[in-house]
Image: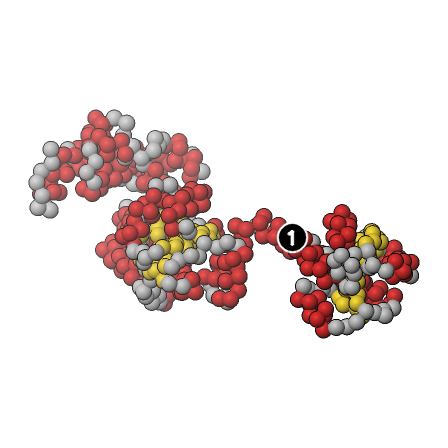
């Protein structure tokens, strides 16, 4: 119930206000009475009334004095003033001190009741609003990180006005203090996503960053505050700190003087990050102002068709040229990662069917480099054509493909036969009868071919190469290398270096 305090120096007036209206019927408790402003203050502090009906002309302290004191002591209490004459001075004083209603005597009980009920309605609406705001405040407090991310993303994508952004900045305590702002986008990889979310704020803490995480693309978008413009070279040590914990690539905008300018910077960094496979791992790339290359799917499709045609015709030199033409074009045009992986996975599937080998798991954009995929296609198209494709028997092709793909493992005839779902005796027979080597011969052939490539393209020691291609014994490796090449590994490597103009190896 609402508490009501009646203040009037005339007893009959107090009695009339008390008895003439059934206050309880309207949810109002008549909490007390007072005969002057001074005693009314004491009563008010004891009873904490919601509403006070107070006469103006009273001894000791009049109604205006009571109103002035109440506004400083209990400002939320609602006050209705009664006066026997509507003089302008009292009215102006009452308005100045925010009286809630002002009634001129003689006044009817209906007028008093209407004034009190209007105040009760107002109090109820205000309490509902306070409750709503309290619930909203609790919601904001409990969900502040998520709300900040949504607001910042709306800002970066141009979905919020500057005026609304200013109110969000205050209500959500956004760290957009400037005076310079730099957008930094980090594209990570799935296995290190947790480390990204944990270490981003720490690595760039001196810039008081606001950070938006987009897990669906493994992106961290940082808005950095600084006193001066930031450059890629200045940010290097901070980027390196994060990359101690997570693999990925940075895309950095130029510095701007207003948050509204960050939208264009975000679009540019996002577009380049979706082409991250063309950039080295753990690289920092200042990309704003760099225009995206024009991607023509028809041109790429034509080059894919040329490569497929060359594979079907079986011309090794033509195949190698087509692979390089295709990849050089892809690197120049830079289609987005998802488009690139889709095309290359489809191409791998088609060529695998042509040459009759088992189709492997599709690539994704994470954990693989474009040059690795280029080398894979060279191997798939050229080596298969020069060895496997000379055999029409599908089980032979599949067997040779499996041995080549797993030569570094501890392979046995039984293991390969099981993988191909054929019997070991049948596999042994078709290899011995229809190819140059039996199972063991092919295993050593692929191991030594791989060893030759490592000798020519790396600085690994000979025993390290032996282990890498599958030999537990260096002596065994040396024997098979001599049988297959007619020289020892040292001579093979040195002869290659001499033809390239280099000295011998020790």
Q: Residue 475, position in %: x, y?
A: 21, 26
Q: Note whether residue 75 is visible.
A: no
Position of 137 with respect to 1 (left or right) is left
Q: In the rendered view, how is the structure colored?
A: secondary structure
Answer above or below: position of 243 versus 424: below
Position of 462 with respect to 350 (left or right) is left
Pick the front one: 246 or 146: 146
The residue that appears at 50% across and 58% down in the rendered structure is 169
User: In terms of image quadrants, where is residue 343?
Assistant: bottom left
Q: Which residue reaches farthest front? A: 60
The residue that appears at 82% across and 56% down in the rendered structure is 35
Q: Residues within 10 Å of mark 1 (few under 14, many from 20)?
A: few
Pick the front one: 444 or 101: 101
Q: Note whether residue 43 is visible.
A: yes
Pick the front one: 72 or 137: 72
Q: Residue 88, position in %: x, y?
A: 72, 73
Q: Which residue reaches farthest right? A: 19
Pick the front one: 116 or 320: 116
Q: Which residue is mark 1?
A: 134
């Amino acid at each position: 119930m609402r508490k009501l305090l009646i203040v009037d120096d005339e007893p009959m007036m107090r009695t009339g206000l008390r008895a003439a209206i059934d206050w309880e019927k309207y949810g109002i408790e008549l909490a007390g009475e007072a005969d002057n402003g001074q005693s009314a203050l004491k009563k008010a502090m004891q009873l904490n009334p919601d509403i006070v009906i107070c006469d103006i002309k009273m001894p000791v302290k009049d109604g205006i004095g009571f109103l002035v004191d109440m506004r400083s002591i209990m400002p939320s209490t609602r006050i209705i003033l009664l006066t026997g004459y509507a003089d302008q001075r009292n009215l102006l004083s009452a308005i100045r001190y925010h009286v809630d209603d002002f009634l001129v005597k003689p006044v009817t009980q209906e007028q008093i009741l209407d004034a009190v009920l209007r105040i009760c309605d107002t109090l109820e609406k205000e309490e509902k609003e306070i409750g709503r705001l309290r619930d909203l405040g609790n919601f904001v407090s409990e969900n502040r990180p998520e709300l900040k991310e949504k607001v910042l993303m709306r800002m970066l994508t141009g979905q919020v006005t500057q005026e609304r952004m200013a109110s969000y900045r205050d209500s959500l305590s956004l760290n957009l203090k400037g005076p310079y702002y730099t957008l930094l986008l980090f594209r990570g990889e799935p296995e290190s996503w947790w480390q990204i979310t944990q270490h981003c704020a720490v690595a760039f803490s001196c810039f008081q960053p606001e950070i938006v995480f987009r897990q669906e693309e493994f992106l961290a978008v940082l808005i950095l505050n600084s006193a001066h413009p930031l450059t890629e070279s200045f940010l290097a040590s901070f980027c390196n700190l994060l990359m101690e914990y997570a693999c990925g690539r940075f895309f950095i905008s130029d510095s701007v003087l207003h948050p509204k300018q960050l939208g264009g910077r975000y679009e540019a960094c996002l577009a380049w990050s979706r082409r991250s496979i063309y950039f080295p791992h753990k690289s920092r790339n200042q990309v704003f102002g760099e225009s995206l290359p024009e991607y023509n799917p028809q041109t790429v499709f034509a080059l894919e068709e040329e490569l497929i045609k060359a594979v079907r015709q079986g011309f090794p030199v033509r195949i190698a040229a087509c692979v390089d033409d295709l990849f050089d074009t892809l690197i120049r045009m830079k289609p987005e990662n998802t488009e690139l992986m889709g095309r290359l996975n489809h191409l791998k599937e088609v060529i695998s069917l042509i040459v009759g080998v088992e189709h492997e798991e599709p690539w994704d954009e994470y954990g693989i480099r474009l040059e690795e995929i280029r080398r894979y296609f060279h191997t798939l198209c050229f080596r298969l054509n020069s060895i496997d494709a000379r055999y029409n028997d599908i089980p032979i092709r599949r067997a040779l493909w499996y041995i080549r793909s797993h030569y570094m493992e501890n392979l046995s005839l039984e293991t390969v036969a099981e993988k191909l779902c054929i019997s070991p005796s049948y596999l042994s027979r078709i290899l011995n009868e229809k190819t140059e080597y039996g199972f063991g011969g092919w295993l050593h052939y692929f191991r030594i071919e791989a060893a030759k490539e490592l000798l020519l393209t790396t600085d690994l020691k000979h025993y390290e190469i032996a282990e890498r291609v599958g030999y537990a014994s260096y002596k065994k490796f040396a024997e098979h290398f001599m049988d297959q090449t007619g020289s020892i590994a040292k001579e093979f490597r040195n002869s290659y270096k001499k033809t390239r103009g280099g000295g011998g190896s020790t």
